[in-house]
Image (spheres, grey):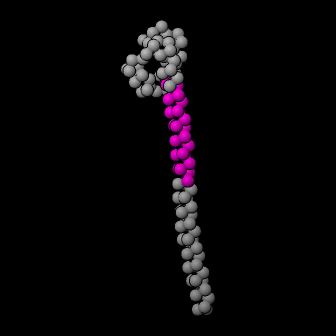
Amino acid sequence: RFAEDIRKEVRQEVLLEGIRQGRQEGRQEGRQEGRQEGHQEGRQEGRQEGLLEGEVKGEAKLLLRMLPRRFGALPKEITDRIHRADQNTIEIWADRVLDAKSLDD
């Protein structure tokens, strides 16, 4: 009977240790998966922001090439405004450039 009690106790300790170890491994795996997902999301968001920023810069660059051809040398305040403008504003200005009679249009 004593030997049987010892076996039960050992089994229970082994089982509890296995559960603890499994939980710890599960937490570590969960953390690692969370980090990986976070890194992937961060990279994807960074790429998207980079693409958008690149589009805006490209459209601004095109506008900075078109305006002087149409109206002559640009005042610094105009080039500064173009560099600071957001994508929507750049698109509006680009749409207007062919019909504009002056830089004020």
Q: Is residue 40 left or right of residue 103?
A: right
94 or 32: nearer the eye? 94
Residue occupying the point 53% across, 16% down: 95
Q: Indicate whether 38 appears above or below 12.
A: above
The residue that appears at 52% across and 46% down in the rendered structure is 42
* Looking at the image, residue 91 lies above or below residue 71: below
Displayed quadrant of residue 9: bottom right
Task: Kindly tell me whether residue 50 is visible in this rendering.
Answer: yes
Residue at the spot 43% in from the left edge and 26% down from the top edge: 83
x, y percent for residue 105:
45, 11
Q: Which residues are magenta?
A: 36-60
Whether residue 49 is in magenta: the answer is yes
Foreground residue, 82 or 27? 82
Observer able to see residue 88: no
In the image, farthest residue toward the top = 101
Point out residue 101 in the picture as x, y percentages from the top left corner. 48, 7
Q: Is residue 5 left or right of residue 70?
A: right
Position above or below: 2 against 18: below
Q: Residue at point 53% right, 50% down?
A: 39
